[in-house]
């Protein structure tokens, strides 16, 4: 893919398009362009179970609020007269060209937000040229998502279950369905304490929701008695037997490296020692994440972990970040602090809840338009020109 400034999308042109459509055709945006306003609107259309699973977090939600507070502590310091008429958001992550330093994070059970779920999200990502990460905990299978995404770039998020035959089957299916990189999520070897779900007694997987990758998998289904393979309760119970993997440790990674020949990124890193150990184990990238605050209450905000991890990694592998990112300026701050790319999660899910594929595309375009315009106002023409000097921490 050619990623020169002349051929990459004019993301900021989305702003002009909005003004022109309003002026010429009296057409206003169907959704707010202030992405922080989407959550309240999405809450109105989602079910109680969906709100509890998607919006709420571990404990009393302190970690999720902390993620947002962390980004708000950093302020952008503009630079002027920098000659930023030619701009490009194009970048490269783990050897793969990206149209922008933003990726759609793996989010499970997207049909809780919209009936089309991951299919709508994959189509939106492909239509805009942004990489989509498919959650193992999805309501649509690898193959279904690959068909929806077409030629769009897609990665696969692996939750390493205790049954290696199932892991192998997932890896083979992902490879055969055109998923180019693997995102190993390691901060969920047990589920965190999530009162919003506990108070409703709602874990979707035990109700046969969000297990489509499993129910379409021969290795997983072979572990269930033939007579019970259509029983959501039996499927959920078997999922529960193999999903928690508290025994997973660093020595297991050599086996995974042997099985998957493409890039492997490890997601859920917050300590510099874990980042450098990831390099020692031959991994290709780290994703700084606290799972959107869904695992440990009072966990450290991801942006507060970022600088130390970037310093420890010292440009040997790319560092990405998720959790708390809602806007284009959030992405800018992450890039300025050394991230190669940022992953957005809840914001696109709110767009999905409100307008399906069109809602996800709206979130993508708004985020990247704001990123490009804010980058220009900060005096940078490309993401590589953003540095910590463009920010000031206020508290």
Image (cartoon, rainbow, N blue to C red):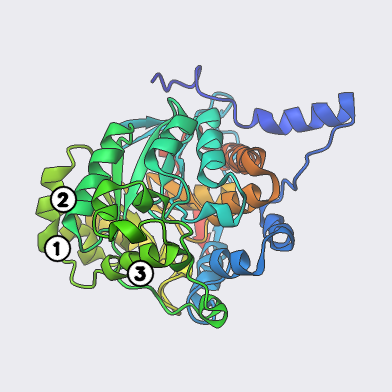
Pointer 3 local density, CA inside 10 Å: few below 14, some 14–19, many at least 20: some
Q: Position of residue 5 (x, y in %)?
A: 49, 22
Viewer-side label of 2, 1: 2
**Disc 3 versus disc 1: distance between alpha carbons?**
28 Å
| For the residues bearing labels 2 and 3, Cβ distance under 8 angstroms | no
Asked if residue 250 shows in the view, the reply is: yes
Label 3 sits on a secondary structure element that is helix
Identify the residue under disc 3.
237
Residue 137 position in % (x across, y down)? 41, 56
Name the side, left or right, on which 21 lies relative to 169. right
Is residue 93 shown left or right of residue 276? Answer: right
Q: Which residue sits at x=55%, y=31%? A: 128
Indicate the secondary structure of the residue bearing disc 1: helix
The residue to which callout 1 is attached is: 250
Tell me the residue that label 2 is attached to.
256
Q: Quadrant of the N terminus?
A: top left
Residue 284 visible in this rendered orientation of the protein: no
Q: Which of marks 1 and 3 precedes in the sequence?
A: 3
User: Where 16 falls versus 243 (above or below)?
Assistant: above
Image position of 267 (left or right of 120): left
Identify the residue at image location x=69%, y=63%: 43
Q: CA distance from mark 2 to mark 1?
A: 11 Å
Task: Of the two numbered discs 2 and 1 on the same chain, state the one appearing first in sequence.
Answer: 1
The answer for how far apart the CA atoms under marks 2 and 3 are is 26 Å
In primary-sequence order, the first of circles 2 and 3 is: 3
The vertical placement of 318 against 304, above or below, is above
Judging depth in this view, the residue of 246 and 270 nearest the camera is 246
Q: Based on the displayed image, in which of its 4 quarters is residue 378 positioned?
A: top right
User: Is residue 310 or residue 232 the one in the foreground?
Assistant: 232
Horizontal side, residue 158 vs residue 72: left or right? left
């Amino acid at each position: 893919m050619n990623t020169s400034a002349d051929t990459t999308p004019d993301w900021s042109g989305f702003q002009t398009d909005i003004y022109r459509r309003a002026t010429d055709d009296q057409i206003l945006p169907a959704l707010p362009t202030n992405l922080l306003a989407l959550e309240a609107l999405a809450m109105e259309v989602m079910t109680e179970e969906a709100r509890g699973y998607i919006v709420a977090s571990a404990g009393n939600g302190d970690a999720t609020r902390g993620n947002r507070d962390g980004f708000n502590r950093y302020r952008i310091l503009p630079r002027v007269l920098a000659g930023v008429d030619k701009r490009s958001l194009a970048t490269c992550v783990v050897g793969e060209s990206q149209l922008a330093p933003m990726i759609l994070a793996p989010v499970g059970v997207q049909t809780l937000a919209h009936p089309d779920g991951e299919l709508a999200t994959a189509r939106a990502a492909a239509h805009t040229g942004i990489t989509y990460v498919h959650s193992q905990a999805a309501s649509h299978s690898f193959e279904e998502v690959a068909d929806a995404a077409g030629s769009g770039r897609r990665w696969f998020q692996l939750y390493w279950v205790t049954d290696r035959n199932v892991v192998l089957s997932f890896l083979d299916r992902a490879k055969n369905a055109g998923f180019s990189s693997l995102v190993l999520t390691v901060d969920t070897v047990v589920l965190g304490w999530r009162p919003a779900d506990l108070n409703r007694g709602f874990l979707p997987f035990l109700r046969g929701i969000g297990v489509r990758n499993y129910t379409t998998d021969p290795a997983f289904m072979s572990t269930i008695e033939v007579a019970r393979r259509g029983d959501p309760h039996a499927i959920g119970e078997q999922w529960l037997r193999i999903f928690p993997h508290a025994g997973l440790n660093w020595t297991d990674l050599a086996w995974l490296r042997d099985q998957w020949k493409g890039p492997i990124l490890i997601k859920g890193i917050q300590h510099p020692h874990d980042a450098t150990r990831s390099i020692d184990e031959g991994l290709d990238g780290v994703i700084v994440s606290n799972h959107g605050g869904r695992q440990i209450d009072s966990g450290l905000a991801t942006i507060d972990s970022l600088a130390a991890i970037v310093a420890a990694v010292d440009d040997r592998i790319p560092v990405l970040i998720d959790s708390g990112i809602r806007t284009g300026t959030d992405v800018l701050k992450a890039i300025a602090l050394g991230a190669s790319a940022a992953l957005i999660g809840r914001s696109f899910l709110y767009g999905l809840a409100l307008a399906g594929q069109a809602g996800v595309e709206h979130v993508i375009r708004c985020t990247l338009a704001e990123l490009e315009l804010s980058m220009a106002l900060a005096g940078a023409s490309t993401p590589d020109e953003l540095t910590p000097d463009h920010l000031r921490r206020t508290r």
